[in-house]
Each structure stands twice: as C-alpha cells, then as structure tokens.
Image (cartoon, coloured by chain):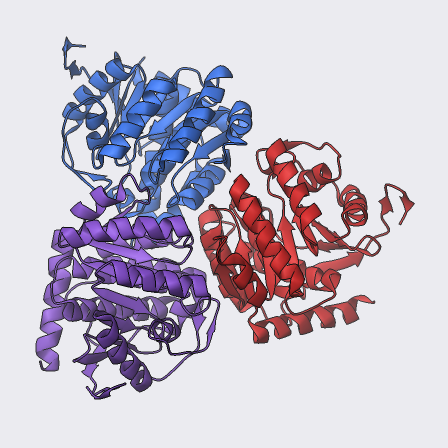
Chain colours: A purple, B blue, C red
Amino acid sequence: MNTSMLEKELSYLLTKMQKAKPLVHNMTNVVVTNFTANGLYALGASPVMAYAPEEVADMAKVAGALVLNIGTLTGELVDTMVIAGLSANANGVPVLLDPVGAGAIRFRTESALRILREVKISLVRGNAAEIAHLVGEAREIKGVDAGESGSYDNACLAVRAAQELGTVVAITGREDVITDGRLCRVISGGDALLTQVTGTGCLLTSVLGAFAAVEQDLLLAGTAGLAFYGTAASRAAERTAAFGPGSFQTAFLDELAKLHPHSLKGYAAVREIQAVSAGGLS
Amino acid sequence: MNTSMLEKELSYLLTKMQKAKPLVHNMTNVVVTNFTANGLYALGASPVMAYAPEEVADMAKVAGALVLNIGTLTGELVDTMVIAGLSANANGVPVLLDPVGAGAIRFRTESALRILREVKISLVRGNAAEIAHLVGEAREIKGVDAGESGSYDNACLAVRAAQELGTVVAITGREDVITDGRLCRVISGGDALLTQVTGTGCLLTSVLGAFAAVEQDLLLAGTAGLAFYGTAASRAAERTAAFGPGSFQTAFLDELAKLHPHSLKGYAAVREIQAVSAGGLS
Amino acid sequence: MNTSMLEKELSYLLTKMQKAKPLVHNMTNVVVTNFTANGLYALGASPVMAYAPEEVADMAKVAGALVLNIGTLTGELVDTMVIAGLSANANGVPVLLDPVGAGAIRFRTESALRILREVKISLVRGNAAEIAHLVGEAREIKGVDAGESGSYDNACLAVRAAQELGTVVAITGREDVITDGRLCRVISGGDALLTQVTGTGCLLTSVLGAFAAVEQDLLLAGTAGLAFYGTAASRAAERTAAFGPGSFQTAFLDELAKLHPHSLKGYAAVREIQAVSAGGLS
C-alpha cells in the first residue's frame, strides 16, 4: 500500500471509530484507570471498567474490544481476566494485552504468558523489554520502564514475537513498530514527554482497542491508533513543552479530542520496514 | 417557594457547607477516587475513602454523609457497603447511592437493588437509564453511558422511582431533575463537556453528599448541589471550551473552589415541573 | 552544619537523585496512585506500584526505596506490606511509612503500629495528628485531615516520636519538621494550596523515598525532599494561585520537573530548632 493510500485508510478509520463510539472494556491497573477513561472519552470512544468475576463475562460480551493490562495484577485478577477473555473470544470481541512489567518480575511474565496461552489475544503492545521477555529474550528493564533500543532491532523483535505468539505485536519507543509477523510498519511521531506521564503506554493500548473495535484488520487498526496517538502527543508537546509534564498531560487529552482525519499531516509518518526475524528473512 | 427565595436558600446552604467542611465518606470506584477527592476538597468539603470491612462502620459513623458508588464493584465490596450503610443508618448519617452501570449488567442492577433493600438510602443519583432499570423500565444504555432523553420524561421517571424506592431521586442529563416523589425540580446549567470527563457523575453524587451533610431536607440539599455543580461546569466551559476536555477538567476544579453565594446568577436556573408519575398525576 | 553548606548538600542530593532515577516501589492508596506516579516521574525518579503477595518481595528487593501508605488499607494489604517490608529490610532497601488516617480510625492506628513493629522503618511522615496517635497522644483529626499546630509543638512531638519509634520522623504542616530524635530541622516554604489537592502528603512521602534511595543519612535525604517539594509548590502557587487547585496541581507537576540545584533560593528555608522532647531537653 503506498503512503498516501494508507493515510486515507487511517483517516477513514478515525472517522469510523468516532462515529461508532465503541465500548472499550478495560481491565487495567489502579494507577491509570482515570487517565485511561479520560483518554478514551477524549478520543470519542466509550470506556468502561469492570473487574468482578460476576460481571466481566457479561461486559466483555457487549464490548467492542477488551483490554487486559497487568500493571497491578493479583492472582485473582488474572483468573478474572481469563474469564473475561474467554467471553470475548466466544463472542468475536478482539482482546488486547498490555504486559506491563513483564520481565521485571517473574510473576508478571508468567501471568502474561498464562493469559496468552488461555485466551486468544489479537494484539499485544508493550515496550521492547516487555515483549522481549515474552519470547524469552532478556533485555534491560527497570521496574516498568524499558531501556531504549533502535527501531530496526525492535522491528526484528516484534516480527519474532508476532510469529511465536500468533498475534499482532506493537512495540512502542522513540519510534513505534507494529507487525502481524509478515508486514512491519514503523510509525514516527509522538514526543519524549509521553515518557514523563504515567499511563501513556497503558492508554495507548486502550486506544488501539478502540480502533480494533471498528476494523478487523488489526495491523491496520493498530497503525491508525499509533499514528493518531503520536499526532495528539506531538501537538500537545508543541503547546506545552516549555511548561512541563503536568501541562502536557492536560493538553494531550485536549488534542485527543481534536483529532480529525487530516491531523496526521506533518505529525506522523508511517514507513514499512524489511525486518529480519529470528528465523531468517521474514 | 418562589425562585428568588429558593435561590437565597441555596446560597445559604453553600455558605453553611463551606463553613462546616463536612466529612464525606466515599466508597467509590477505582476510576474516580482521585477526581472525587479533589472535587470535594475544591468545593470546601473534607473527603475520605475507606473500604476495609474492619473500618467502614467506624468511618461512616463519624462522617457527615456516606456515598456508595458501584462503578467497579465486587461481591465483597457490596457486603462492605452494606456494613457501612447500616452504621450510617444507625447514626443518622445520610446515605447516597450512585448505581453506576445498573441496567448495563445484571450484577450491577442486582447489587444496587440489594443495597436499596438492606440500607436506608436518602438519595439516589444516576442517569436516566440507570434509574429506569432500578424500577424495572428498560432504557438504552451502553456500558456506563446513557442515551439522552427529555426532561419531562426524566421527571416522570424520577417521580416514579422516588415513590417506589422511598428516596429522593436525581436524574442528570442535559437538564437535571430531582424529586422527593411529590415536588419535582428541573435544574438547567452545566455543559456538555461534563460528558467528556470521566467521573463527573460520580463526583456530583459526592457533592450532593456534602450538601446532605448540612441540610436534612434532601430535596433542598440536592437542588443546591445540582445548581452549584452546574454553575461551576458552565463557568469552566466558558474558559476552556476552545481547548478541550483536559483543560475543562482542570478549570472545573478551579471553579468549584471559586463558588460563592452569588455564583448561581446567570448560570443555573431552577424550575418546578408538574410530572405525571406511572400511577397518574403526582 | 551552617545554612549555606547544608544548601549545597541538598542541591548535590537533587542532582544525584535525578541522575540515579531511583526505582521507588509504592504500595499506596487507590486515591493517589496516579498523582504519585506522575509526581515521581516529574521529579526524575522511576515509580512502580505492586501489590500482589506473589510479587512484592521481588519488587521491593530491586527498588531504591519502598513506600508503605495505609490510606485505603485492608487487612490483606497490611499482610502484603509486611512481606514487602521484610524483603526490603533483608536487602538494605529503606522503607518509609505514611500512616494516613492513623488516629481517626482504630484499625488504621493498629495497622500502622503493626507495620512499625514487624518491619524496620527508616522514616515516617505524617501530619501532627497522625504522628501523635502513633505515640499515644490524642490530637484533633477529621477523617484524614489534621488540625493545625505550631512548629515548636510539632518539633517536640517529632523528637519524641523519633525516639520512641526508632526512625526519622517528618511532620508536615504550615511548616515542616524533621528529626532523627536528636537534631531537628524546620523547613519553611510550600503553599496552602497543597491542602486543597488530594495526595500531596502521600506524594511527598514517596518523594522522600526517592531521596532516601540515594542517601543513607535519612535526615539529610528527608530535608532535601521537604525543601525541594516545598519549593516546587511555592513556584506553582505563584503561577496559579489566582486560578485555583486544579491549575495548581497541573503546575505543581510542571515545577517538580523543573527543579534544579539552585531552585531552593528564595523558596525554602531550613533552620535547626532546639526541641524539648517528652523526656526533657533533647
């Protein structure tokens, strides 16, 4: 697909999502619930949080997407995530996984892998260290923050992870990469201020869920989510970089609400990359 | 009561509440805890959150009001809410219920109804769909967001619910209605930006709690809460509508802190409405 | 130590902390998780939250500091805090305690005292009422907000508490005091707007944790944390006092991110005080 055709597809998806106002069922960590809900409202989606074993299957069934985030998991919560995930699977609702802190702590790595085994996951989004640990590669991680690595390395890792895990994989960092294991795209845009605000990765996964709710091609949905998210961040940073992360967070919500089909121009660029997977040329 | 006398009463209540700085015990959902606490502080009240079975009875006893919000309930949490509610009942502390998502999911409807059966509730606030489901009417609901309906319909529904549930009922929407089952008031004001920020309904219920802590006539207390809340929202929207929901949320907290007895003028209007309840003319 | 030498030490510690980006493991209440994480990121530290019995020992072990905050505790969570605390103790990681609401509710007082008995705590930070109740003095407390008392009284109380509890004790209020039971410092600065934003005390304890992660002399680390925190608050208030607590909160995060070694000048003052402890002249 050439760039200008792709841009048209992404723009069309934004409009489609804004019109559909998809219900996104988030089972996320206690740090980011508020920011996630506000970000989804700003984007034009309809967030809901539900965690009780008694209700998650019912909620996931009627949602447009289910987002599982293990940022502050407990053993019991993982059980409930599996209940929700199986309900989503049975009803054709895409399930996204954010493996926050996988690799930093064994319990998180194991919980993420358990979810991947027991639930059909459509898309995984994490930083390079988190994704690496899901496929048995060790990378530097401190708490929940990854070290930085290059887009080419990330692309190779993402391709390998997509093939092994059987999902679309997005790795976010200075540039973002996304792949279904064959085609790999690099999205540039965004701003380093995103790393100074908690939950920007978590919200992004939920934003990808909003796009996944309206587009079955999850590589395309994910590309749209990454491109528009980075665009909102770049525009917010233009207004607030002189002030700091508090002002940026506020402006970022404003800019998510202002996204329109022509917002990408000058703010986000998508290119395809030939990535070498673990098993040779992909 | 004529309008100008009512306005004086409402203004007096604001001053009374600001002086008393009532302790409002919130058992609310994990999405809105921070916003609720900040909103109550801004208003001049004193928020506290407590959820442990070991402490909720002690906390509810010394509070000016107890607010129960089922936005992210679990079975265990509903048990604890009943413990807190019974302690409040035994000590003359008003209890308010926010049935978030009732109707969307059976477990939530049932939990709200259980609380209404086991605890004496003074005031219920919800959107039209939530209130409708508490009295067995089906209305459109998507996740936790209601469809929009007219003030006259909402007034009829509120009157019916107030009579059946034996509480004051407030239904919020484009305009808000509140009734004790006989007298019904419509409060206009507020701003559509409220629907783009998560927790604005939840915080409102807690704000009604702050007014209920200083005024036994809960219809009057509720009218004050709705009118001043809408006023703060309107004023915040004047400053920030050009920016978006992030800026609005920040400004809304600012404006809650700036409320004074004369703030209502030009921002909120209260009228009485003759509502037809399910059983005939009310 | 004379004032200008102390100021140099504090400035040096800020730089050291910003370079180290210490991992601060927070087990904190559900109201303040987001604000705490954002505040620590703004300061330049690396926050992580982890609550599961299965992972807290692993996380505390690799952290630079562990912060225990009982703002929305449950019996089970206190058990888990002890697990985390013992792991921190065994690995030389300083543990800080924020006894939110101790004194207001017996369960909280008992839980704070249990943690103090079972875990070696390096620093306790609270308001005067909370600290008083830990050493068996009754002071006025409403919910989680203390009444106001003078710096001299607070210094005496802090010295007594430090001696009895065997930790560094910080009492925050109009002025802050900190002591190891012998030397007592009073830090002025900050702004009353801090009392209108929820979680500013909780975040402060986590900020002290970030400094404790890079400096073994906890009286010095705590003095640095208090002085820089107050400085950021004063600067934020300069920009936003005309607006209100919403704007202040945003600006406060901005100012935490702008702190540099020379920020203290004109904003924070540290003096030593001769405090009379319960047992006579200290």
Q: Nearer the viewer, residue A216 or B151?
A: A216
Task: Give the image quarter of residue B129.
Answer: top left
Please tell me which residue is depicted at 62% across the width and 60% down the height of the picture.
Answer: C88
Residue farthest to the bottom, as pictured: A281
Q: Quadrant of the N terminus of chain A?
A: bottom left
Q: Percent position (x, y) of residue C279? A: 89, 42
- Let me know if residue A132 appears in the view: yes
Q: In this view, does C106 lie to the left or right of C239?
A: right
Q: Percent position (x, y) of residue C262? A: 64, 71
Q: Quadrant of the C terminus of chain A?
A: bottom left
- Let me know if residue B231 appears in the view: no
Marker count (numbered) = 0
Q: In this view, does B144 lie above or below B133?
A: below
Please tell me which residue is depicted at 33% across the width and 75% down the height of the picture.
Answer: A135
Q: Percent position (x, y) of residue B236? A: 35, 45
Q: Nearer the viewer, residue A30 or C114?
A: C114
Q: Is residue A124 left or right of residue C250?
A: left
Q: Is residue B181 above or below residue B242?
A: above
Q: In this view, does A265 lie to the left or right of B18?
A: left
Q: Percent position (x, y) of residue C193? A: 55, 47
Please tell me which residue is depicted at 9% across the width and 72% down the height of the picture.
Answer: A8
Q: Which of C278 and B80 is in front in this view?
A: B80
Residue farthest to the right, as pictured: C280
Q: In this view, does B222 lie to the left or right of C109?
A: left
